[in-house]
Amino acid sequence: MAQFLADVFAAFATVPFISFVLIYVIAYVRTKSKKESIRWAIHITMLLLLFSVSGMIKAITESTAIFWWMIVLLVVIAVLILFLQWKIRQQINLGKAIRSVWYLGFVLFAVTYIVLIPIGIFTYYGKM
């Protein structure tokens, strides 16, 4: 059963944009709310993109610690957002900061995924 779940996760992480659409449709059927369905799709696809981009960078550069650098990047973004909240409003809203980091991470990793696809293809065929 664990192997089956790992295989399903790997399949979804391989094509996160198709996964996004599939998750959106499932969430929409369940909730009947477009806004809530998009949120669910973004949250789950963000995790898929995190692992997918990490795997792509690892395959292209043969780096082993890239996943942790991506986590550090998200933490640095969170610290910057919290600092800006404190500087502008003199108060911190942790929930809003976490959501902002999550959505910014989604956009950042989606763009990175799109950029890495051709780089990975050229790298793979360049080694042949």
Image (tube, rainbow, N blue to C red):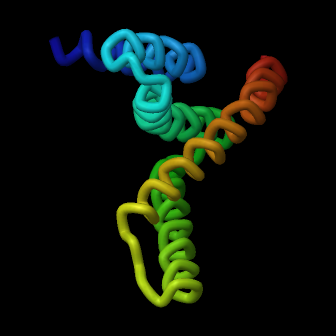
Q: Eyeballing the image, is 111 above or below 8?
A: below
- Residue 89 location (% of width, % of height): 52, 84
- Residue 122 location (% of width, % of height): 83, 24
The residue sitting at 45% across, 65% down in the picture is: 97
| Near-viewer residue (89 or 57) | 89
Q: Is residue 55 left or right of residue 44?
A: right
- Residue 99 location (% of width, % of height): 45, 54
Q: Is residue 120 left or right of residue 45?
A: right
| Near-viewer residue (79 or 69) | 79
Quarter of the picture holding the C terminus: top right
Q: Quadrant of residue 11?
A: top left
The furthest residue to the left = 1
Q: Eyeballing the image, is 11 above or below 81?
A: above
The residue sitting at 79% across, 31% down in the picture is: 119
The residue sitting at 64% across, 43% down in the picture is: 107
The residue sitting at 42% across, 19% down in the picture is: 10
